[in-house]
Image: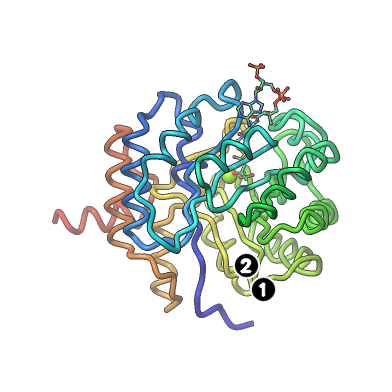
Amino acid sequence: MLLPINVKIVEVGPRDGLQNEKETIPAEIKIELVNRLTRAGFSNIEAASFVSPKWVPQMATSVQVMAGITRKPGVVYSALTPNMQGFEAALAAKAGEVVIFGSASEAFSQKNINCSIAESIERFRPVAEAAKRHGMRLRGSISCAFGCPYQGEVSPESVADAVRRMRELLCDEIDIADTIGVATPLQAQNVMERVAREFPITELSGHFHDTYGQALANIYASMEVGISIFHSSVAGLGGCPYAKGATGNVATEDVLYMMQGLGIETGVDLNAVVDAGQFIAQYLGRKAASRAGNAIAARRKG
Ligand code: HMG
Ligand code: MG
């Protein structure tokens, strides 16, 4: 199959990227990061997470972040909402899209959201209905679609089952997530081809963490089978607090560099993302985990 002409990049750095940071990052820094990403041209930025602050303390600033960002018309600012309490907060914060996040692995569902897969769907149901009632976009995220830190292997059939359940809740878009970054390209294609039998392929996305260094290869392989939405995190920030050892999402700068080389349109300005990546890495006091970002920054200095 031919590669896509356009790809949508969902920037998840302010949420997936920062949620795992130990030191509380002030809301102003997060706001500055989101504003920089907005100016870089993303059409969708995951900016907040309305989860229990006892479970993920870093996301407790989500109300201030959503209130403080400068919104650009047409840009969708998303927020994670595990239950109605989260939904009410997302509604009050004027999120454009809410994300219900489940799992293809029973073990991970218990660890991450403290309930079984079946129970999680019942919690999501009122959230999904409320999102539709309020005209908000609804996204479903499926963790551990390629492997689980607790149960090991996850079958493509259980991913397909999770996709069907998210489809029944009327999700507009569904993320197939490699939480612990273990997928390899052929596996990525197999799972994507399987789930595309359950949901329109144009509304499926690849959410690849880069723990084993396979994320770019997995994105390329997924494009070969027709996927055209990908998640990435500026400066390669991140990890999931309930998936020990899992590193960040694939770095946005690296994805954009590859897309540019392939002549694939993203609408995002790579140079502006490099700046945003260097900004947040400097704040955190460490080098950005983006090969392309650091190379471009070094070339500028040279
Ligand atoms: P629970 O303890 O079963 O929930 O947690 P509960 O309903 O019994 O409530 C317990 C307490 O939490 C109560 O407070 C609630 O008010 C509060 P208390 O009375 O003890 O003071 N609470 C909330 N507070 C704020 N906002 C809320 C909320 N809900 C309850 N929405 C729950 C269940 C789902 C809440 C919890 O397990 C949780 O917050 N989990 C979040 C885990 C998380 O955020 N993980 C990271 C994001 S997922 C991810 O990174 C994966 C992804 O990137 C894809 C991939 O890579 O795989 C998306
Ligand atoms: Mg993730």
Whether disc 1's CB lies below 8 Å from ligand 1 is answered no
View quadrant of ligand 1: top right
Q: Report the residue at 37% width, 45% height from top.
A: 69
Q: Position of residue 230 (x, y in %)?
A: 55, 61
Query: Which image quadrant: the C terminus?
Result: bottom left
Which of the 4 image quarters holds residue 73? bottom left
Q: Report the residue at 51% width, 66% height from top.
A: 8
Amino acid at circle 2: Ser
Is 228 located above or below residue 81 in the figure? below
Q: Position of residue 142 (x, y in %)?
A: 70, 49
Horizontal side of 188 relative to 115 (left or right) equals left
Question: Disc 2 and disc 1: Cα gap in Å?
Answer: 5 Å
Instruction: Residue lying at the far top in this picture: please name it.
Output: 54
Q: Which residue is mark 1?
A: 225
Q: Which residue is mark 2?
A: 222
Instruction: Residue lying at the far front in this picture: please name it.
Output: 133
Marks 2 & 1, CB-CB < 8 Å contact:
yes
Is 164 located above or below residue 265 in the figure? above
Amino acid at circle 1: Val
Which of the 4 image quarters holds residue 215? bottom right
Q: How is the structure coloured here?
A: rainbow
What label sits on residue 193 in the rendered view? none
Dot 1 alpha-carbon crowd within 10 angstroms: few under 14, some 14 to 19, many 20 or more: some
Dot 2 alpha-carbon crowd within 10 angstroms: few under 14, some 14 to 19, many 20 or more: many
Is 100 located above or below residue 295 in the figure? above
Label 2 secondary element: helix
Which of the 4 image quarters holds residue 40? bottom left
Q: Position of residue 98 (x, y in %)?
A: 61, 48
Label 1 secondary element: loop
